[in-house]
Each structure stands twice: as C-alpha cells, then as structure tokens.
Amino acid sequence: MSFSLIGKNILIVEDNPVFRKAMRDMLYSLQAGNVVEADNGIAAINAMSKNCFDIVLCDYNLGVGKNGQQVLEEARHRKLIDYRCVFILISAEQTTSAVLGVMDSKPDEYLTKPFNAQQLMSRLTRNFARKEFMVSIDKALAGGDLSKAIQLCDSLLLSADKKMHLHLLKMRAELAISAGDFDKARQIYHEVLEHRELPWARLGLGVIDFQNNNIEQAIAGFQSLVADNPMLMECYDWLGKAYEALDQYTDVENVLQQALQLSPQSILRQKKLAEAADKNGNLETAEKAYKSVVKLGKHSVHRSCSDFSGLAKLYAKTNAAEDALKTLEEMRKEYANHPEAELRASTVEADVYKTLGNEELSQKALLKAVDICSRLGNKAPRDLQLEVVKTCFLSDEHDKAEEILYDLIHAHIDDEQFLNDLRRMQSGIGMDNHSEILIQKTKQALIATNNKGVALYKQGKFKEALELFEQAILTMPDNKTIIVNMLKIMIHDLKVNEFCEEKNQRIKALFIKAKQIGVDQHKLGILQMEYAKLRQSQAVKA
Amino acid sequence: MQTSPKSNGLFPTILASTVHDIKNSLGTLLELVRQAAARQDGQSAELNQLEFEAARINHSLMQLLVMYKVDSQKFSLDIEESAVTDIVNEAIHQQARLAGLHNIDLQVDCNADLLCYCDSPIISNALAAVLNNALRYTRNTVLISVAEEDGYVHIAIEDDGDGYPPHFLAADLNDTAELDWVSGNTGLGLYFVSVMAGLHKNAGKSGFVRIDNESCLGGARFKLFLP
C-alpha cells in the first residue's frame, strides 16, 4: 500500500476512554505520528481552530453537548476544515445520513464500530485516493473558479478512469447546473439513467425542472422519486422548495412532517416546518416544531435568535404571554449585545404587552424596535422588518410602518415570494391590498428603467446605460434584476471595447454583490462562464 | 398528519434502543478483550474465543437493527457504483483476525476493474457474516470469486468443509416468508443476505442468493447475485 499515515495530522473525537485508547493504539500501530484527542464536541472544535487536520475520526454519540454531526457541520461552516480533510463519522450502528438528520453536510465516510486497523486503513486509502483524484477540481471550486473546474472535470472524464467515471459525471452535471447550462446537465442525467436507474440522476432532472420554473413537472418527478426511495431526504427538501414556489404551504408542511418523521434530528428542516405551520395557522404543529428547533439549536451552528423569537411569537398568539416573555428572556441571555436579537425581542414584546393591556411597556418596546430597525436598515432580515411593520400598524404608528415598507418594497420588488409574504402579513391584520399601488408603481418604475437601460445598451451607449442603473440602484438597493443587468452590460463592454483593469475590478465586485443578495447561482453561472471565457481570450491576446 | 403504519406501541422503538445500547456495551467489551489479548505475550485461546463470540453477537445485532428498520419501513438502500474488490476486501478485513487465527488459506479471485451497483456497506456486512461461517466450517481453504453473468454480478464464497446440511439445501432461500430454515447463526446470516439481495433491483431483475455443496474445493458454496 502506497498510502501512509506518516506526517498526517489526525484528530480523534471520542468520549469513551476505552475507544479513544483503542483508536490511538490503532493509529500508532499504523505509524501515525501526530494524533490529537478530544473527548467532547467543543474540545474538538477548539482543536480544529488551532490545527489543520488531514484526518478527523469523530464518534457520533459524544454524550452531552454536540454530537458528531454537529461537530462536522460547525467545522465546515466555520471553515475549520476544507476539501482536503477526510472526515469519518463513527457510530455504533450502520448509519445513513437520514438517521442522523443530515441536511447540508455529509461526512466523507461512515464507519461502524467496532472496526479494526485494516478496515480503517482501507477506508482512508480509498478516500485519499478519491480526494487526490478530484483535488484540482475542488481547488478551483474553493477559489470560486467555475469555468476552470468545468475544464478540469472535462479533461478528467477523458482520462478513462472507470472507477471514477460515474462520480465525475455526477460532478460534471452539478457544475453544469451551477453554470446555468441545463442542457448539458440534462444530457448527462439521461445518459446515466439509460444505463441504470439511479436516484441522484432522477433528482437532478427534477432540480433542472425546478430551476427552469417547470414547478409542476418537478413536483411530479420528486413525488415518484420519494415513493421509490423513502429515505432520500434531499428529495423531501426539494419537494418542499417546489411547493413553496407555488405558495402551497399546506403541502410544504405535509412534506416536511413526512421527512421529519423519518429523520427528526435536522434543525433546518424543523425550522422550515415551524415556519410553514405558522403560516398555515397550525399553531400546535408550529409550537412543537419551534420547541424542537430551540432544543436542537443548543449545540448547533445553525441556531439563530429567530428560533427563540419564533417560539415566543407563537406563545403570544396562543395567549401564553408569560411563556412568551420567558422565552425572550432566555433568548436575551443566549444572545447578549446582539442587535438583531434585541430587535426581535422588542418586536414581540410590543405585541405581548399590548395584549396584556400594558400600553406603556408596549409603546416603549415598539419605539426601541423601530430605533434598532432604522439603525440596522438593510442589515435587518427582511422577515423581521415585516414583523416590525406589522407591529407598527397594529400600534397606529402608520408613518413609521410606511417608511419601512417603502424601502422593503423597493429593495425586493422582483421577489414575488417575498411580496406574497408581505401581502399575507397585510391581509392578516385586515389591510388587504394595502401596498398594491406602491408595488405596481415600483414594478413599473423598474420595468421603465430596465427598458431605458437596455435601449441605451443596444445603441452602444454602455456608459449611459450603466449610469442609469447606478442611479436606479440608489432607490432600489439590492435589486437583483438591476445588478444582473449591470453585469451583462459590463461584460459586453469588455467584449467590444478596450480591456481595462478598472472595469475588471468593478465586475468582480458586482459578482460578489450579486452573490450576497442571493441571485440564483445558475443565472450568475452563465455570466461567470462568459466572463471567464473573455478573460482567457484576453490572456491569449496579451 | 401521518402515523407510521406499524405503530403497535412503544415496543419496536424500545427494542431498537436496547439493541443499540447492547451494541455499545459490546463494543467496549470487545475492545477490552483486544487490549487484554495484546498485553498477553502468547496467544490465549480463551481470549480469542471471547473475541470471536463478541464479534458474532455484534454481527447478529447489526443485522437485527437493519431488519427492524426494514420492518418499520425506515429503510431504503443507498445504491452507488462500487468496485467489487472494495466490497469483498471490506468483508475480508472484518474477518481478517479470524482467518489468521485458524490459519486458513483465504484465496480471492476478483477482477480489480469490475464494478457493481449496490449498497456497499450492507453487502459487505452481509458477506462478512457468510465469510465468518465459511471460516468456521472449512478445513483449510476458503475461496472468494467474482464474475459477471447474464446482467448479474455474482460473488461466490466456497470452502472445503463438510458443506451445508440438507435442510438448508432444501429450503427456498428467496422465499423470505418461509422461515423454517432460519435457525442458528448460519441460518440468520443467510436470511439476512437473502433479504438484502432481494431489495437490490434493476431493470426487472432482483438480487438473490443460491447455495449448494458443489464447491470446487469440495465443501459448501454460497453465491450472491446482484443485478
């Protein structure tokens, strides 16, 4: 065997001293030199923030505190380990990701206890071989270079490594989706399926339907897939997303219920369920889900102050004012000096005190909320801003409410899902269609600006078109359509006019901005590919 | 809201938790035995036996847990393309100590490029249980061979022991409702691997198991077919 543990940094995470010793002995017998041990999740995270590990062997069940999956999620989320690290999750029973409630972060390998040195070594050998094979692609992706990753993947596919072929095809299809090249991705999935009915390829086809806005077709595909593969948790998540896109929250709730029955440990899924049930007015389900979220959040990197305020809001709705206030108190303890948490707390408090008949405290809380909200501005999550608006309306602070609404509508005018949330909020407080005129006016303004900009662009007046959009972005900050249009114009500008570094820098900054405000990856991917091609031909010319 | 179709009380959950708990204890026990064995200079027959028995209990419990999940409809295979050598090697590595202890000549005939579609951890574990039996009942040699045939990949494990007893040979292994033959470790292992094979499906074909005493080595022959 050419693979060796010499020089590798290894972390063992295991609470049971007998197993810890066993693993350490095993590793030393395999010539490992640098072995660090941790007996709980926090110690593991600390060790990973200090050292860069090549291998992490982590037990799932770590007693109190974080479990192994939570350690992995936090390590990846905080970038304590990267694509080079082999993370093996160890457990007492044959494990699948469904059992562990994995939603966004899978380990490189699962290993069942007890295992011997040969088993461990063969897993490590296989994983390092795979990583070494894929390293160039992973590196390009980590650097955000989609075009290079695709090139590398294509050339590896030609290398005729039979064992890696299917793995590469899967990767290639995913890269194609990221680049907005749905035809290529679809072609790969069909090719794979012709050979063998594989769930991931079927799922991929559904995802393409979804991204292409063929939502009904996507749903049909996902439904038949879960019928055949009840443990394919990813598919439930996509199904939920698809129903959400159709604004069918009862279906969203049902699908998540189904998924959580099979895999109750996922905090992110519980959160989605809580939100959907809340929207549907199923307070009992929502309360239960929020309680799970708060509980699961205790040791999870995915926890957030909104978990607490969500629960508190529910208590307020069910007239359990005391519980609501208690939850907020707990939240303030967990999130001290956290403006968003304080904003959430104050908003709920304004509501609760009002129902308790304490106008004075309610008013005080509202003023505080409005103050924090205007200080945070766009940095406050939009759902939270909506809450503040609602509370303002309910407390007859109409001016303040309209002010925030105006900014919200301008910022998110091209996000129909959010506008629906906004409409729902207004209907909920007896203000049906309240903002409809503003919404339509803003939409028209956006269309007008767009048309004008595109016309200028067609006349070759790039500079003027860009200036127009720059102006528009001042009144509609974070508007996705405008940002994407600006990118298109700038890239085209580079194509026909002189190349210059300043323009390049601006494009890069716009790409970053587009990512930040959540432009769909596949829309951005097309532009990224175009830009990469341009850079390449420029490099050749130079 | 949906309830699980077989919610006959808390028992299934308690069973699963209990098995899980026993498995944890067993793991510790096994490790302590290993450490004690390592401290002793010469080989201790009792400790080896202890280790072997603990490993067997562990195997049975693992299978029980999987069968419980199948029964409560919380199980589906995770099919991926894998190299057959990797699957076979995993089973061999699991049983490596036993092969070494009994001084058995373990031969493997497997094309390194051969790939198959299956849930590889499940299949490796099932094969390991079959291999465990072969290692116990053989005289000198165990042969693992792999081939492709009629759209199936088949993995054979054969030995030079006395062969399967007649009531095993008479049983229809693929009729998993017919449980007469399921007794003792060998029977359970065969039952498990039959059920798991049957869950593997492709293009109208299902996986299956066949046993006979036609081994080229003169003893029992087990064959797993994966579509």
Image: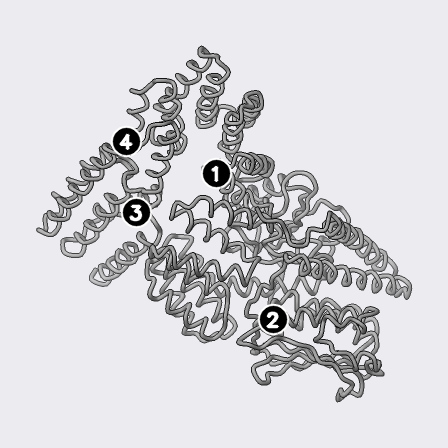
Left or right: A318 with respect to B212?
left
In this orientation, does residue B92 appear?
Answer: no
Amino acid of disc 3: Phe
Chain of the residue under label 1: A
Same chain for mark 4 and mark 3? The answer is yes
Return the x and y of residue A509 as percentages of the image width and height.
29, 44
Q: Nearer the viewer, residue A475 or A410?
A: A410
Amino acid of disc 4: Ser
Q: What element carries label 2?
A: loop
4 or 3: tag closer to the N-terminus: 4
Label ID, residue B200: 2
Label ID, residue A511: 3
Q: Nearer the viewer, mark 2 or mark 3?
A: 2
Q: Mark 4 points at which residue?
A: A435
Count residues near mark 3 (Cα–Cα under 10 Å), then give few for <14, some for 14-19, many for 20+: some
Q: Is mark 3 on a helix, strand or loop?
A: helix
Q: Which of marks 4 and 2 is in front?
A: 4
Q: What residue is at 41 percent from the left and 51 percent from the top? A: A242
Chain of the residue under label 3: A
Count residues near mark 2 (Cα–Cα under 10 Å), then give few for <14, some for 14-19, many for 20+: many
4 or 1: tag closer to the N-terminus: 1
Same chain for mark 3 and mark 1? The answer is yes
Amino acid of disc 2: His
Label ID, residue A275: 1
Q: What element carries label 4?
A: loop
Q: What residue is at 71 percent from the left and 74 percent from the top? A: B175
Return the x and y of residue A343 as percentages of the image width and height.
44, 24
Chain of the residue under label 2: B
Determine the CA span between mark 2 and mark 3. Answer: 46 Å
Q: Nearer the viewer, mark 4 or mark 1?
A: 4
A359 is higher (above) or lower (below) than A490: above
